[in-house]
Amino acid sequence: MEDGRTPEDRALVTAVLGGEPGAFECLVREYQGLCWHIVQRMVRHPEDARELCQEAFLRVHQCLHQYRHDAPLKAWIGQVAYSVAKRHLERKRIPVAEDADEEGTPLHERVADEFDLEAAVVDDDIARRLHAAIARLPPLQRTILTLYHLDELPLAQISRITGLAEGTLKSHLFRSRKRLQEWLAPGMGVAA
């Protein structure tokens, strides 16, 4: 299906809800990478991330009966993982995002969607510096950037996961890209 909902997802959900042996393990295998990307990018502590991924899948198991097939299962599971990680950061009083631009400029109008993050990474040194710079971003921007550029999720699915409007996501992407450019340009001999 065009919007990401598949008959396979529907069958998997039905199998899990029906208690079929191995069905939930199959669901976990299918979506553990997505869950890990979201949680690890938000939290950045491997031990906490592992526990939070387990908590996210526990919630998926407990709440799967609430899934209505109106969105891709991937987005729904991503939303659960995101909310678990966000609550963890809030409990620890860790800011989830940086403050908005002081100028109040609608940044989402200036974002270039054709920006290819992976094409910009042509060798190991640049890749290492890029990943180090991404790790410096606030949790929300780090997660949005990863979901959009590395997991290649469309903005509509990221919006479902985070609960943020697409324009807000574009603003975060713009700020993240700008910050990465500022951090990486001096070491690359490129004027910012």
Image (cartoon, helix red, strand yellow):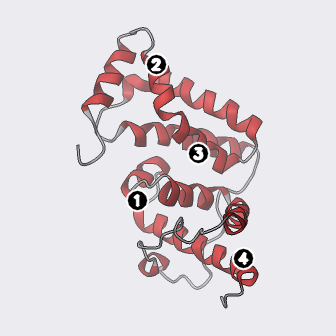
Q: Nearer the viewer, mark 4 or mark 1?
A: 4
Q: CA distance from mark 4 to mark 2?
A: 42 Å
Q: CA distance from mark 4 to mark 1?
A: 25 Å
Label 2 sits on residue: 24
Horizontal side of 50 relative to 161 (left or right) equals right
Rendered residue at 58%/54% (across/down):
143
Q: CA distance from mark 1 to mark 3?
A: 16 Å
Q: CA distance from mark 2 to mark 3?
A: 20 Å
Along the polypeptide, which appears first: circle 1 or circle 3? 3
Residue type, numbered disc 1: Leu
Label 4's element? Answer: helix
Q: How many C-alpha atoms fall within 10 Å of the one at disc 4: few (<14), some, or many (≥20)?
A: some
Along the polypeptide, which appears first: circle 2 or circle 1? 2
Horizontal side of 28 relative to 191 (left or right) equals left
Rendered residue at 67%/63% (across/down):
134
Label 3 sits on residue: 37
